[in-house]
Image (cartoon, rainbow, N blue to C red):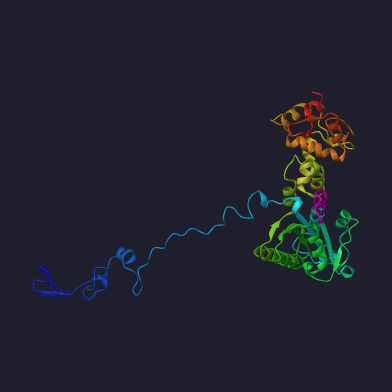
Amino acid sequence: MCAQTSNGDVTYGGAQLCQINVVNFWDSPLAQSQCLRPPAWWLHKVIPARGREAPIPAQTSVPERRPAKSELTGLSALLTPEECVVLLIDHQPFQFANLHSHEPTMIVNNVIGLAKFAKAFNVPVILTTVLEARGGKLIKGLQDVFPDQKPVDRTYINAWQDKRIVDLVKATGRRKLILAALWTEMCLAMPTIHALGEGYDVYIVTDASGGVSAEAHDMAVRRMVQAGAVPITWIGLSGEWQRDWARESTLADAIKIVAEHGGGSGVAFAWESQLLGASSRNNPGCSLPQEMQRPMYKRFRSWDSNGPSRRELFLLAAGAASATVAGAPGADARAYVDHRPARNRSGLTVLDIGTANGH
């Protein structure tokens, strides 16, 4: 019979047995004296390694997430022309000579496209150069967008240290800066970080800027983002400014700029205008055969007869370049539409494609 004495010892038939902790039985003198070995499943699943505490199951934690509502989200986070000012920094020959993060022709194309969009949307643009006498004048294509504007020539690498530039920005009363510069790691990073510290919202146009290497450009962008800047591309910016295909006041200019500087997007617009019959007067071979026009146009008609379709608005914009619309050679699309207006509920003048074709 087993019995337990007052001091906790266990006896069996009058003989004293050693008290054993069940959990540590395999480490007890009794188990070791009998050369007993625990089974493998016991070693791996029950007994922790010697000299270590038994592991405590880790508590499941929810990763920290940014609040759903912040100044970086929602409709108000998208840019509008009325709140922006553009600063284009040092797009000069010397900087282009050591530009290796991008193909130089791409930066030339993109910064000119950005400048044209800013002009079309009446966004103030400030041009600046550094040591123009040695680094060269602003590239011609960019200066031609603003032929009457003299770039601010400075000695500071950090443009935001030049009081003239800061005063020009302040005079606009706008707090959202759109910056593009050569080089990214110097002439873009410095004013971006400086202006952020003064409470401005800074958006860096990464594909209208470039550095001396891909790594230099990338590291500079990362540093600016870490400081609070928002990266954007010139096409992305133009989309936020346009926002609505029914915004007729800027649609014609937007289409024209994309056609000139938008690469594949410009080619796609030209193709779409061909499919819709808006071919050039000087290239009548691009027009669709007459027998194909009626079914093609019917397929492209808006399902909502009360409102213009995107393609109808595109036709209207494409006419700004004196395109041939609906078999009317040499007619300006806008003049044609104004001649035979069709009003929708919002009062917009739209092109009735069926009427234009005489069907």
Magenta stretch: includes residue 232: no
Against 219, is 235 above or below?
above
Judge left or right: residue 302 versus residue 291: left
Residue 28: give x, y in percent of width and height.
Answer: 24, 74
Residue 19: give x, y in percent of width and height.
Answer: 19, 73
Q: Residue 149: name its quadrant.
A: bottom right
Against 186, is 177 above or below?
above
Q: Residue 143: name its quadrant.
A: bottom right
Judge left or right: residue 14 versus residue 66: left
Please state which of residues 65 and 262 is positioned toward the viewer in this rendering. 65
Specify the segment rendered in magenta: 115-124
Quarter occupied by the C terminus: top right
Quarter occupied by the N terminus: bottom left
Please state which of residues 316 and 164 is positioned toward the viewer in this rendering. 164
Against 63, is 235 above or below?
above
Residue 70: give x, y in percent of width and height.
Answer: 61, 55
